[in-house]
Amino acid sequence: MGATDQTTTTPAEARGALLSRVEDRLSGLLTAEKSRWSAVDPRAAVPVEAVDALVSAGGKRLRPAFCLNGFLAAGGDPAREQVAVDAAAALEILHAYALLHDDVLDDSPLRRDEPTAHERHAAEHRAAGWAGEPRRYGEGVASLAGDLAHVYAHRLVGALSPAAREVWHDVCTEVVIGQYLDIRVAAERVADPELSRWTAICKSARYTIHRPLALGAAIAGRLDLAAPFEQYGAALGEAFQLRDDLIDAFGDSSVSGKPTGLDFAQQRMTLLVALAVQRDDRVSRLLADQNGDGAELGRLITDMGVRGEVERRIDHLVEQARSAIAEAPLSPGWRDELARVAVEVAYRQK
Amino acid sequence: MGATDQTTTTPAEARGALLSRVEDRLSGLLTAEKSRWSAVDPRAAVPVEAVDALVSAGGKRLRPAFCLNGFLAAGGDPAREQVAVDAAAALEILHAYALLHDDVLDDSPLRRDEPTAHERHAAEHRAAGWAGEPRRYGEGVASLAGDLAHVYAHRLVGALSPAAREVWHDVCTEVVIGQYLDIRVAAERVADPELSRWTAICKSARYTIHRPLALGAAIAGRLDLAAPFEQYGAALGEAFQLRDDLIDAFGDSSVSGKPTGLDFAQQRMTLLVALAVQRDDRVSRLLADQNGDGAELGRLITDMGVRGEVERRIDHLVEQARSAIAEAPLSPGWRDELARVAVEVAYRQK
């Protein structure tokens, strides 16, 4: 990309070129690690293969894209492109770690259209008649594969500046705390919309949009963009999470590639449910019901017309995100591109 | 320490002074994180508290000590002391992550004289009558606390040089692969002494001794010490692991602060068991027995006199470790100190 003439390249093309370098970086790292550990013993490569299976299965690559959006919109120096590509790759493999561990926490059977790592390895253990408990083994493999992805993520960010490193550590810490709040609130059945909002901010808004954008801008040395990117990221991040909740509640599993209806079944205090709690006391009562299976909760929320209200809130948040960057000094074409991206993320189907 | 006159300070005093700075660094970081997250919600601080509980419960601080041994024996510049202290703190908190996750993998009830994190939090869930499965919640908290410790470890090594960073990433990767091989070999009941040796090298020798020493030397800019420190670390690391196996097999739980007899009960292919396999076919058969409870295995290994043989091998390894550094250009007093440390580690009771 160093020789690319910015006047003839659209923002989407510039990002696309860097995103394909991100894919090369990821597959290069994982291929090298697979051969390194296979040489010791084929068994030693299993955790690497579990990471690779998830990374290769696709995914939206949202976090790398937002990191590169941040870098390019900030007019990042081509000499720093490799650092931005590595950081974008790090965010994607960090996401693989988060998913591997989350799927164990939630006992989720399906991810990216495939059985989850812990399910697959528990099944392998069962089929082979190995010693010990299949569940502990399967969850162990997923946990270790997640740990390995976590190490690889940190390996990829060795060249960050102190300011960019701070953003990186924030995102790493927040996703863990957000995940804990999520399982804690679900266990306690806390009906506290403010806490749910905060959990969603940690787990989704900052993790998926705000911090990746800020990381890209920090790599470009543009700390002045921290504030507008935070506003854009916070608004679009909430929209992203609300869409996630809608997809889980009302989406089509064959389109999204993951099971739907899980949030209601687990009586989770999602942003969607939090909005419903504020409107009708019956929602709180159903959430607190230890014997509820979530079906009644789903029906009530549907009947309340919360879906339409959430759609209107998403419209509003997309508008907020666009205004946040209306005056920000961005590279040519990037204001429109970030507005377009906001629409794409907020109105996605999967 | 910058003003310390090396001629009037013994190696043990110099290390002790830096080790107390490591404690301050760890407690400073964890205290700051507890207040930061408590301010959001008291629940948000729970994963930090779980990390703190383990770090504060003691432990031998072997890895920080070896990192500082490496730095000081290499004559590290006082101006780089803070980097060495941070790296030593990083190794200790990396160890907290490894223990939190290992205890889930092994379903271990006790650590550092206290119930393990997953046991404690499963019990809290049960007592409070929260929704969902206590085991999944308890293991989830331990898993997330481990993830958080892992993030903190990486946060502490931001100032490493590229050469030192490479050593750091090696130790992080090896401990995961070693841990996977451990659970895989236990599941398959593979009686392959070479694979067990390799697992022990990854999980113990390199992790506890060789890589921490090499990290300290790399921070001191002394890459010439990589080879002698590798030989010293490999020999002492194997002695360390053999002692670990002996403590598990024949030790006193009230002295070691962790349950004993677990390796036999889980029919694990430890180095001790691997040695026994090479001497008597009955050991392989007992290991392969899916219905065995390990008691017979323990009796057979005891009767075979493997314990005495392992003690002799430890003597030999300590001698090897001493020879490895006999000609290495170390700071005054450090050859003797590293020899003394080898004896301390190889003949410890817990």
Image: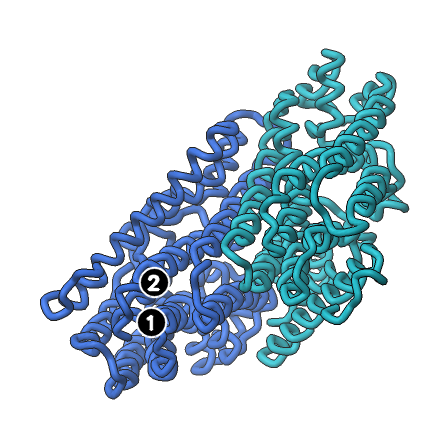
Chain colours: A cyan, B blue
Up-down relation of residue A50 to residue A343 (above or below): below
Up-down relation of residue B62 to residue A194 (above or below): below
At label 2, the amino acid type is Ala
Secondary structure beneath dot 1 equals loop
Q: Estimate the x, y position of residue A104 in percent, counting from the top left.
A: 65, 47
Q: Is residue B295 shown to the viewer in this render?
A: no
Q: Nearer the viewer, residue B129 or B85?
A: B85
Q: Residue at x 72, y 37 (%)?
A: A327
Q: Nearer the viewer, residue B149 or A115?
A: B149
Q: Earlier in the sequence, mark 2 or mark 1?
A: 2
Q: Chain of mark 1?
A: B
Asked if the residue at tag 1 contacts the one at tag 2, i.e. Cβ–Cβ closer than 8 Å, the answer is: yes
Q: Residue at x 78, y 49 (%)?
A: A334
Pick the quarter of the image with the C terminus of chain B: bottom left
Q: Estimate the x, y position of residue B339 in percent, counting from the top left.
A: 22, 76
Q: Estimate the x, y position of residue A42 in percent, counting from the top left.
A: 64, 76
Left or right, A247 with respect to A124, comes to: right
In whole angstroms, how far apart are the C-alphas of marks 2 and 1? Answer: 8 Å
Left or right, B211 with respect to A160, comes to: left
Q: Residue at x 60, y 59 (%)?
A: A153
Pick the quarter of the image with the N terminus of chain B: bottom left
At label 1, the amino acid type is Ala
Q: Residues within 10 Å of mark 1 (few under 14, many from 20)?
A: many
Q: Nearer the viewer, residue B325 or B31?
A: B31
Residue under pointer 1:
B220
Numbered label attached to residue A163: none
Classify residue A271 by image quadrant.
top right
Q: Are marks 2 and 1 on the same chain?
A: yes
Q: Estimate the x, y position of residue A293 in percent, counting from the top left.
A: 76, 27
Secondary structure beneath dot 2 equals helix
Up-down relation of residue A25 to residue B145 (above or below): below
Residue under pointer 2:
B84
